[in-house]
Image: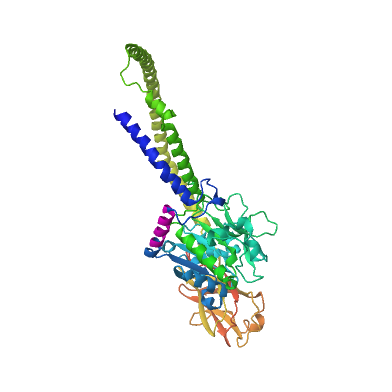
Amino acid sequence: MKGIDLLGTLRRLSTAVVAPVAALIASLGNQTADMDDVVQADDGDLAAYLKELRSHTRGHNQTRICLIVPDLANIASDDPNTVIRTQLELISTVSLLDQTGVDGGVEGWDFFDLIVVGSNTYAGFTNANLDDLILTKIPIMVCNSAVAEHLKMGTATTQSANTVNEWCKTIGNRIMYLVFGSTGDKALFDAGTLSDRLDMSDASLHEHLLMTSLTGDTNTTAVVAGLPMESGTGVLYTLDDDTEMPAARLFAGCFVNADNLTDLGTLLLRRMTRNFIQASVTPSITLKANASLLAKIHQDTNELETDWTNGGRLDNLLDAITPVGPTNAQMNTARDAIIAEIDTNETKIDDLDGDLVTHESSQSTHRTALTNHESSQNTHRAVLVDIHGTDLPAVKSVADAIAVLVDTRVAGRMQIEVYPLDLDSASVGSYATLTATDGDIIIESLIFSCTRDLSGDSGFTGLSVETDDATPQVFISQADGVKANLTAESQIAYTGSILLREGQYLYYSVYGGSVASVTSLCEIVIKFRAVVSGGYLA
């Protein structure tokens, strides 16, 4: 009785669902699940409810937009991005960010509902500054093709000089119908205005084209197009380099010259932005995926209604259920089947017993192998003990001897030290360089070289190099270092023997006036020997 009551309840529920589902699809204006025919009906109960829900949601949730511009310091002169900013502020709170701020990596993107990359007409973007946006999990709208290409949304192509009326004729006027509820030629720009375009033909992309150019392309060169994050069945889409789509992306090249938008153009900017930022929280009643799902529900409920009618497939199955228990013949058949199953299981048990005997023999073999392995380990252990006690000390002794031979700081062994410097803007005075460390050293040669010609620097007369001893030992005198000798890639050399005691240092002096404010890379190369092992220049 309980089973029969449950089936009867299901039959009543399926009958009750058919009419509301059919009405729901009718209110959406389409029962074919064809996107081109889906329209929004204001008189449907569900449509009206969803519109009211959307209104309340917007009233109680503050959305936030980040507008990224090339040059924040000169935003007042950037007319296209000023217009974009003004229109965005009519929808939501807008934060301005310079491209260098993106590169700095300090922005908390989770704070925003939408990122808008503005126009590059007044000033260009440096793509490397925007690398952090490629995998950002926030919806992004891009208003220029160069950045869109860098964000893996397609390939930038030449700007189009077609009239806006031609653009609006494409794809059956879909963008004009979905956004403005009507079709026909619409002027979004002043005459002759250019628009950025993006080739989205890459097989990795799943673009939704809303507006294309009619200059011979095959509806893959977009003026306006969206890249959804996933399909209606939850399959994740990819960027054009086959990496996962982190969030929805929208290319809107028609706003690259936003300062030339007509009133209809600014309305398009506002509506596209509003719809994009609301997409994650407001149900859409024009999505193809929803229309397809509702059509399938409608089809399934119609089938259930047919199956449960008197004489239908499910009704006949229910009527065929026997209301009494099994017959004696049925019980005997069931008993024989149980006995046959028991016999089969006994055979399987016997097979398992044989397998256990085989397994026990295999274990005994493995146990013998483990004993032999343990004996081999003991032999290896004895060899290692002998190596550690006898061979390693001998190897260490040889290694210590080699270390002495290769040590560059052994007494009497030649050493070389290079001191780089930049004389850019160097003023008159003396500057310390290298110090004798961990012992006395004997300097046998010193070379001063400079890559830039210093002979023409006004005021500057020359330089010298010497020690800081009470009686300085001079390597390059002021006479030798006169600026006439400091031409491009010149070298001034000293050869001899001068003792530099531990703690004493070399310095160079600048005479006459400051060196010009130009990069002036120089080097002091010194050959020397330690008096006692360990001495060096540092």
Q: What is the tally of numbered marks visible in this picture?
A: 0
Q: In which quarter of the image is the N terminus?
A: top left
Q: Main secondary structure of the magenta part?
A: helix
The residues colored magenta run: 45-56
Does residue 408 appear anywhere in the picture?
no
Residue 159 visible here: yes
Image coordinates for residue 303, horizontal then vertical, percent: 46, 36
Q: Is 443 positioned to the left or the right of 380 in the image?
A: right
Determine the image quadrant of residue 465: bottom right
Residue furthest left in the image: 1
The location of residue 245, given as percent across then percent down, is: 51, 53
Q: Does the magenta stretch include residue 365?
A: no
* The residue positioned farthest toward the right in the image shown: 216
Q: Which of 278 and 312 is in front in this view?
A: 312
Give x and y (percent) for residue 462.
61, 84
Residue 511: image quadrant is: bottom right
Residue 305, compared with residue 188, is above or below; it is above
Is 199 displayed left or right of 504 in the figure?
right
Residue 368 sits in which quadrant? Answer: top left
